[in-house]
Image (cartoon, rainbow, N blue to C red):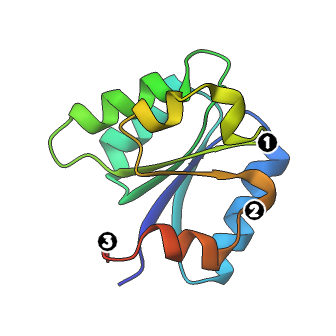
Amino acid sequence: MALRVLVVDDHPSFRRFARRLLEAAGYEVVAEAADGASAREVVRRQRPDLVLLDVLLPDTSGFELAEELHVESGGPVVVLTSSRSASEFDGAIKRSSARAFITKRDLTPAAIADLLIGLA
């Protein structure tokens, strides 16, 4: 059974890119969201296994949203993403409840699979 994924990013072009990439690799992208409020609603309705979550959203921080999702019982695995490098977030990634971080330029099906070994 394919992992069910929610892609959260405020840039439509990145959401389309991530959807195509993930679906071509056999993931089921159940929805896309442009902000934290929409993402929360989708997680409640769709119950994805994985949330690919942009660190910088217009209405919330990806770090804050990752923590909210982590606190929920049975919440999805969160992989943070950004066009910025991990070093630019001054340790916030390591302190977050997200399972992993990947830069947008490094997003590939193989990279996601490596991050999720043992999940499926």
**Residue that carries the numbered disc 3 in the rendered image:** 119
Kindly identify the residue that appears in the image at 64 percent across and 76 percent down.
109
Residue 83 has which mark?
1
State the image quarter where residue 48 is shown: bottom left
Amino acid residing under circle 3 = Leu
Cα–Cα span, label 1 and label 2: 9 Å
Quarter of the image with the N terminus is bottom left
Upstream in sequence: badge 3 or badge 1 = 1
Give the x, y percent position of residue 87. 68, 36
Q: Do the residues labelled 1 and 2 touch (CB within 8 Å)?
A: no
Which quarter of the figure has residue 69? top left
First in sequence, mark 3 or 2: give its number: 2
The secondary element bearing badge 3 is classed as loop
Other residues around mark 3 within 10 Å, as few (<14) / some (14–19) / many (≥20): few
- Find disc 2 in the rendering and name its residue: 106
The percent position of residue 19, horizontal first and vertical second, equals 68, 63
